[in-house]
Image (cartoon, helix red, strand yellow):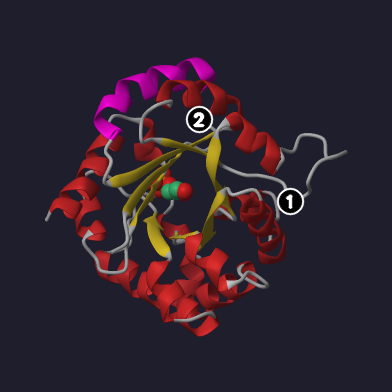
Amino acid sequence: MRKKMIAGNWKMNMTPSKAKELVTLLEPSIDIPDVDVVLCVPAIDIMPVTDIVKGTNIKVGAENMYYEEKGAYTGELSAEMLTDAGVSYVILGHSERRQYFHEDDAIINKKIKKALEHNITPIACCGETLGQRECNVTLNVIRKQIQEMFEGIDAFDAADCIIAYEPIWAIGTGKVATAEQAQEVCHSIREVMKDLYDNITADKVRVLYGGSMNEGNALSLLTQPDIDGGLIGGASLKMEFAKIVGSAHTNVAV
Ligand code: 13P
């Protein structure tokens, strides 16, 4: 039985002062032991947020990380810096990083390997554009992304990674994938993991859906057999996030 996970991706929002206010308000309602709740926050918010959630079940994640160990890489953050600051998850390969910062699957692969080396759990993102969906190549696109992101990673490590399916056309647009569309792709991600590794790995890996998930649509998505949680953008910046966590909790209880 895979444990449900609800992760917020704050993107480039929330000053440290605002971050403290929001997490202080959210904390009592999102500290739930049977759901893994992760707040992936801008680098400057990591330490203040870590301080607030200390002693709870809530974990802190980063939104990016560099693949080198350390050195002359102005502006970048290393895995060691993140773990020392209290980070246990990192979002890698988000479509916004692919689009605006030209990250490709080979770069993401190096980042995943470095995160694993430092015991940070990668949340590796994949997803198709609207054009690709309309051309019926979604499953091919996803397969290629997963194959390249997981190149050279063994089954033991792969099973511990989180994969987030985020159709690009659903991100920040209010256009959510239907539960059937999201389930179809999340299921096929598990099939790809079965082909690349084995049944045990495919069964263990957690697959999240992301893209305009909100309190209204969360339950129908979270009750799909291959959707193990959500990666939430806009709705993670509000109290609505607690409602989404609540939907995952209800789903566990059922
Ligand atoms: P929205 O929930 O704002 O659509 O963003 C999804 C996302 O990109 C999470 O990583």
Question: Amino acid type of disc 1?
Answer: Tyr
Instruction: Look at the image and tell me whether residue 22 can be seen.
Output: yes
Residue 20 in magenta stretch: yes
Q: Residue furthest right?
A: 72
Residue kind at label 2, given as amino acid type: Asn
* Residue at the image point whose x is 38% and y is 24% from the top: 23
Does the CB distance between marks 1 and 2 fall below 8 Å? no
Bounds of the magenta span?
15-31
For the residues labelled 1 and 2, the Cα–Cα distance comes to 24 Å
243 left or right of 96 in image = left
15 above or below 243?
above
In the rendered view of the protein, which quadrant contains the C terminus?
bottom left
Q: Magenta part mainly helix, strand or loop?
A: helix
x, y (%) of residue 27? 32, 26
Which of the pair 21/85 is nearer the observer? Answer: 85
Residue matched to label 2: 13
Q: Is residue 101 left or right of residue 50?
A: right
Image height check: is 45 above or below 17? below
Instruction: Kindly indicate the quadrant of the structure image that contains residue 86.
Output: top right
Where does label 1 land, which residue?
A: 67
* 149, 69: nearer the viewer: 69
Tell me where residue 15 appears, x and y as whole percent.
53, 21
Q: Helix or strand or loop: what does disc 2 sit on?
A: loop
Front one among 62 and 221? 62
Tell us which disc is closer to us: 1 or 2.
1
Callout 2 crowding tier (Cα within 10 Å): few <14, some 14–19, many ≥20: some
